[in-house]
Image (cartoon, rainbow, N blue to C red):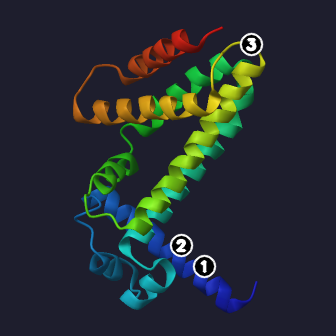
Amino acid sequence: MNKKLQQSLETRRRITEAAKELIFKKGYKATSIEDIVKATGSSKGNIYYHFKSKEGLFLYLIEEWDADWEYRWKEKEHLYPTATDKLYAMADQMALEDVDHPMAKAMDEFVGGDNLSEEVRVKLADIFANHFAFNKDLLEQGIASGEFQGDAEALSVLLESLMVGLSQMTRLVKLGEVRRLYRASITVFLKGISS
């Protein structure tokens, strides 16, 4: 790797780490590009060179968070022999690791904004398309093994909607033990698709 590329990657990493720390501490809206400039010593132009906008930077952080979630999932997926077991384990991972995560709170704030550009909406749609594909793959495993029935593509959207809605509700309203609620939602979902 040449020195210029290495410096560029290091700058990008420094910007993302500072932005993540600030957003986790202050929230998405309260964190400005100027805050990131101060924290990194980078210029505004340098930040915009790497990410085009504050929204672009945050979308990158969402993708990074998703990639980390999938990595953690793949490390343990082999522990769950059936698709049903995997659905419960996925719900556990979400309940135990994601609900109170600062990134989840920042994402609610970001997505809840009503002034999202079309470019941002398209990128968010791509991010959710990856979630749907993950769900679809898991549901297709269950359909192939005879555990589930139905249209995996449609069910993947329903499953994602159930998980996202539950995630938002558990952050808005203290609903008791979050893990129990996530597992109960999977039970209800499975009653509708079990063979």
Image-based side of 41 in relation to 151, left or right = left
Q: Is residue 125 above or below residue 5?
A: above
Crowd rating for badge 2 (residues with CA inside 10 Å; few <14, some 14–19, many 20+) = few
Q: Nearer the viewer, mark 3 or mark 2?
A: 3
Q: Give the image quarter of residue 83.
A: top right
Does label 3 or label 1 sit earlier along the sequence?
A: 1
Between 10 and 74, the one nearer to me in the picture: 74
Q: Is residue 39 left or right of residue 188?
A: left
- What is the x, y in percent for residue 105? 32, 47
Residue type, mark 1 in image: Leu
Percent position (x, y) of residue 146? 74, 13
- Give the spatial CA distance, label 3 vs label 1: 47 Å
Residue 46 on image: x %, y %: 45, 88
Residue 41 is situated, as x and y percent measured from the top left of the image, at: 39, 86
> Which amino acid, mark 3?
Gly
Q: Quick check: marks 1 and 2 in contact, CB under 8 Å?
A: yes
**Residue drawn at the location 65% of the way across and 46% of the way down:** 71
Quarter the N terminus occupies: bottom right
Q: Residue at x 36, y 52 (%)?
A: 107
Label 3 element class:
loop
